[in-house]
Image: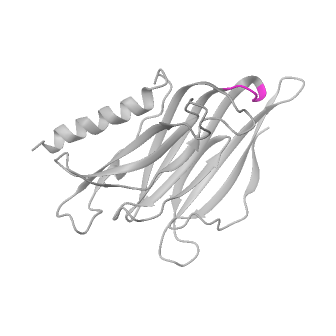
Amino acid sequence: MKTDKTLFSFLLFALFVNLAEAGSLDNASPIDLAALTGDYVASNPGFETVVPSWNKFDSDGNGVPDGDKFHFDVYKTGTVTKLFSTLDVFFPECPPISKFHSHYFEKVADFKRIGNIIILTAILRGNCTGMPTNKLNEGYLYAVNVSASSNTPWSKLFNQRLDTGVIPDRNGNGVAEVMAMTSTLTTDTAGFESSNATVNIFDGKTGAAIVVPRVYPMQH
């Protein structure tokens, strides 16, 4: 049986392989792993370790992977015994207007917990043909209750940089909410930059929007 320390090293290695597959991690943000170990599965005595899994997928059948199927693998902590995998969600590497994927050079991730729900926030940075200046800064959310394999995840896809946080319950269902903020940067003809933030709040359990997204100026 592997020790907790050994499995933790395995988890870090799995994260490194998935995040570094496209290139350098020089500019990547630190990853908070706290949500990835806990007492999630009632039928399993002790803790579970949750490993994120990205798998290349060809969604249009042309023989070239154009995105990732993402899920969590849930293990007994301290072992390599996999209890189950959560359901897959496909995330495209490039928006539909691009059609062709050039390459991406960085994938960064963050993990948060609401009860038995784990929320992945991932940002893909790279290049897509057909995009303005071919640049890509895409964010996506994947949230699922990891207490059982049959629980349905909810997900969101954004074509901007994405930051998230957990906030207190707003709709009275006893589950905290996810605040998601995207940001856009523009440059005027004189070369001055400005940026706006769009704020979304989603039900932590279902992903349903709780407020109408609003845009706020951040930098003038």
Answer left or right for 111 relative to 51. right
Which stretch is magenta? 128-132
Q: Give whichever of 5, 206 is nearer the camera.
A: 206
Q: Give whichever of 70, 164 is nearer the camera.
A: 70
Residue 72 % position (x, y):
38, 50
For the stretch drawn in magenta, the main secondary structure is loop
Residue 32 visible in rendering: no
Vertical comparison of 197 with 58: above or below: below
Residue 96 % position (x, y):
71, 39
Residue 135 % position (x, y):
69, 27
| Furthest-left residue in this view | 1
187 magenta-colored = no
Residue 52 % position (x, y):
39, 44
Give the residue at x 52% y 28%. Answer: 106
Give the residue at x 41% y 33%. Answer: 18
Vertical comparison of 79 with 30: above or below: below
Quadrant into which the C terminus falls: top right
Vertical comparison of 193 with 37: above or below: above
Q: Quadrant of residue 93?
A: top right
Residue 92 visible in rendering: yes
